[in-house]
Structure formats: structure tokens, C-alpha cells
Amino acid sequence: MSATVFPKAAPGARTFLSGGIRFCGWAWIVFAVLNLADLAWRGRDMASVVAAAVMLLGCGIAYTVALRPRVVADDEAVRFHNLLRDVRLPWDAIDRFEGGDAVYAYVGEERHRAFVLQTSPRARARTELKARREDKKLPEAVAEYMRGRTATDFTVEQLRELAAERKKDEGTPGTVTSTWAWPAIMALVVPAALTVVTIIIASV
């Protein structure tokens, strides 16, 4: 997990994302670009067109699943950029953040889940095992702080701190909004349709 500031983000915004998943996404993009270049250079049959369409579909999946998901916290709200939807949660509307297997934001009886930084029980067990191995290399206070904590836990802790700083007690709470992420949808639909069409043409 990493918390960073993106050039296009609002001033003071903090972005939480998974470095490992993003690396896999970019690795696929590079792999696909190299293969598309090879197909453009040497491909001369319909099978090459089908392969190119599949590569483009893979790029759409890589963008939607690996490169797009993130949590962005600015002065006004927290935004969960999930696979196909974006959820904007004003600080005043959020009752609390919870962790566990994912980052959750509670607004009244509603629970909003961030896709990025999800943690399985197995991953949590691996983190605990690794922390025990590293305990002897760290100062006691640092080891105690790190023990058994995942990227999800650290993100929730930072979001709670930001909420305490930026949440206002007076006034009417803001409205939670959820919108479709059309770039992600198009990144999947267009190459998927192209793949189906090319497969049909190739099989005729």
C-alpha cells in the first residue's frame, strides 16, 4: 500500500492505492504493447486480429481492476474509485471508518466498501507471521505498532485521523453520491465487443 499525492489531485489530497496490484497492471500493459507491436509488424491473418482484440481487452481489464481503484481523500470528501463506480462521501456524512477485510465507510445504516486494499484472512495471517520475524530487527515500540497490521489497517487509521481533522459538527451533512465510471466501462465494453466480432468473423 502507498499513500501519495497525484499531480492532478486537489491541493492537499491524499491517495491510497495498492502498489503491488498497480505493478501487475502496468506489467500487463507493457506486455500487451510489445505483443501488439509484434502483431502489427508480422500479423497478416485473422488470428492476429483476434489476438490483438484479446490484448486490448486485457488492457481494459488491467486498467479497471489494477490501475483505476484507489481511495482519494481531500478537504471536502473521501472518494472510493471502485471498478465501475465512484462513490463520493463528504466528511460530514461519514459516521466512522472500519477495517478488516477491506476499507469501509459507514453513513447511517449504509456501508460503502472500497475495492482497493482488500485483505484476505490468508494475507492477514502472512502479515502477522512476517511481523513476528521482523520483531527482533525493530525497536520494541515500532514492532508493537506494526504487529499484525495490514495496509488496510493503516489506511483506516489515516482516514480516521483525517476525518477528525476535517469533519465539521455544525451544518447539514453533505450527500453521498455514486456515479458510473464511464471510462472504465468503455475500457471493457469496446474491446470486449471487438473481441466477439473478430472471433465471429474468424469462425465464419
Image (tube, helix red, strand yellow):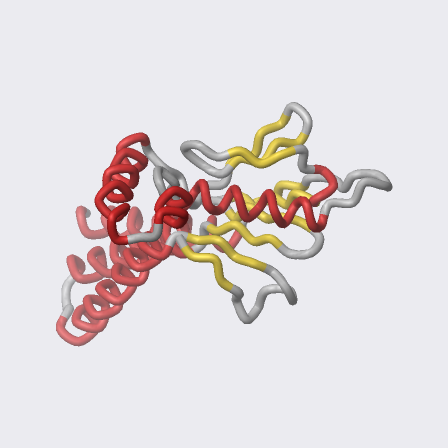
Residue 188's spot in the image, x, y percent? 40, 50
As displayed, is residue 16 above or below residue 83? below
In the displayed structure, does residue 139 sit left or right of residue 69? left
x and y, in percent, of residue 144 in the image? 38, 42
**Compared to 19, does 5 lie above or below?**
below
- Vertical side of 188 occupied by 118: above or below: above
Relative depth, front residue between 61 and 145:
145
Tell me what residue is drawn at x 49 percent, y 46 percent: 155
Q: Nearer the viewer, residue 9 or 53?
A: 9
Between residues 144 and 107, which one lies in front from this camera angle?
Answer: 144
Residue under the point 17% across and 76% down: 41
In the visual, does 112 lie left or right of 75?
Answer: left
Residue 122 against residue 203 in the figure, above or below:
above
Q: Is residue 113 found left or right of 90 in the rendered image?
A: left
| Nearest the eye: 183 or 103 | 103
Residue 23 image offset from top left, x and y in percent:
30, 59
Image point (24%, 43%), residue name: 130
Q: Quadrant of residue 152?
A: top left
Residue 45: image location, x then y, percent: 14, 63
